[in-house]
């Protein structure tokens, strides 16, 4: 058991040699023994090799921890990406089914088209169509022959009223015909 209060003592030291500074520390190799003796060339090269190994062992340990962390992070990101892809596939499937359902036509019910109330010009275009105006024009041009067939001696103010009546009836004959015979047209 290590006692923190007692002073540490290493010895007797035969020889000590600085191996170099690295990572904020100065690395020192120490030869222990009872007699003082210097490092031999063989011991010096072994000490240098061992100290280099110890330096790189620390780097390798840090690298191993970093590699382990990066592998765990990559696995987490891969799992999250797979989960995200699954969610996207589910959402795409729901969207495709919804679009497919919306594209189907329902034959039993005909949907009504919503008509928006608009300006006077839009209302007039809806009421006064070209076929209606043509029918009114034909009714106006044919009204003197119709009056001549049924009432040959009609006086001029009355002929104007009858001509206006025939023109109005001719104008509204298309909308009334569509309402009455709309199913068969």
Image (cartoon, rainbow, N blue to C red):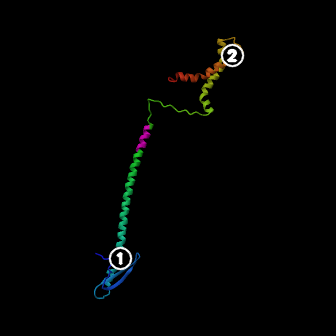
> Residue at position x 68%, y 17% from top?
161
Lower sequence index among marks 1 and 2:
1
The N terminus lies in quadrant: bottom left
Majority secondary structure in the magenta region? helix
Disc 1 to disc 2, how far (Cα)?
126 Å
Residue 49 picture location, percent across and down: 33, 78
Q: What is the x, y in percent for residue 92? A: 42, 45
Q: Position of residue 48 (x, y in %)?
A: 34, 80
| Mark 1 surroundings: few (<14), some (14-19) or many (≥20) residues within 10 A | some
Is 95 part of what is drawn in magenta? yes
The residue carrying mark 2 is: 159
Q: Say few, some or many: other residues with alpha carbon within 10 Å of mark 2 (under 14 / 14 to 19 / 20 or more).
A: some
Question: Camera-side residue: 35 or 157?
Answer: 35
Secondary structure found at label 2: helix
Label 1 sits on residue: 52
**Residue sitting nearer the eye, 153 or 179:** 179
Bounds of the magenta segment: 93-101
User: Is 10 drawn above or below residue 127 in the view shown?
Assistant: below
Residue furthest to the right: 156
Q: In the image, what residue occupies the spot 63% across and 21% down?
A: 168
Above-or-below relation of 71 to 135: below
Q: Residue at x 38, y 59 (%)?
A: 74
Q: Is residue 18 above or below residue 69?
A: below
């Amino acid at each position: 058991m290590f006692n923190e209060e007692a002073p540490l003592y290493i010895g007797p030291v035969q020889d000590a040699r600085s191996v170099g500074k690295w990572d904020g520390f100065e690395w020192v190799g120490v030869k222990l023994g009872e007699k003082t003796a210097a490092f031999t060339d063989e011991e010096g090269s072994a000490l240098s090799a061992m100290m280099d190994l110890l330096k790189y062992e620390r780097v390798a340990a840090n690298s191993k921890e970093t590699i382990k962390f990066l592998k765990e992070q990559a696995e987490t990101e891969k799992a999250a990406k797979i989960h995200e892809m699954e969610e996207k596939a589910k959402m795409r499937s729901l969207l495709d089914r919804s679009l497919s359902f919306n594209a189907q036509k329902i034959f039993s019910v005909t949907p009504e088209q919503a008509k928006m109330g608009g300006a006077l010009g839009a209302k007039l275009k809806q009421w006064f169509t070209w076929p209606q105006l043509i029918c009114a024009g034909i009714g106006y041009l044919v009204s003197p022959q119709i009056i001549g067939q049924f009432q040959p001696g009609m006086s001029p103010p009355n002929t104007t009223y009858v001509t206006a009546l025939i023109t109005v009836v001719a104008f509204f004959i298309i909308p009334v015909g569509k309402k009455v015979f709309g199913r068969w047209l």
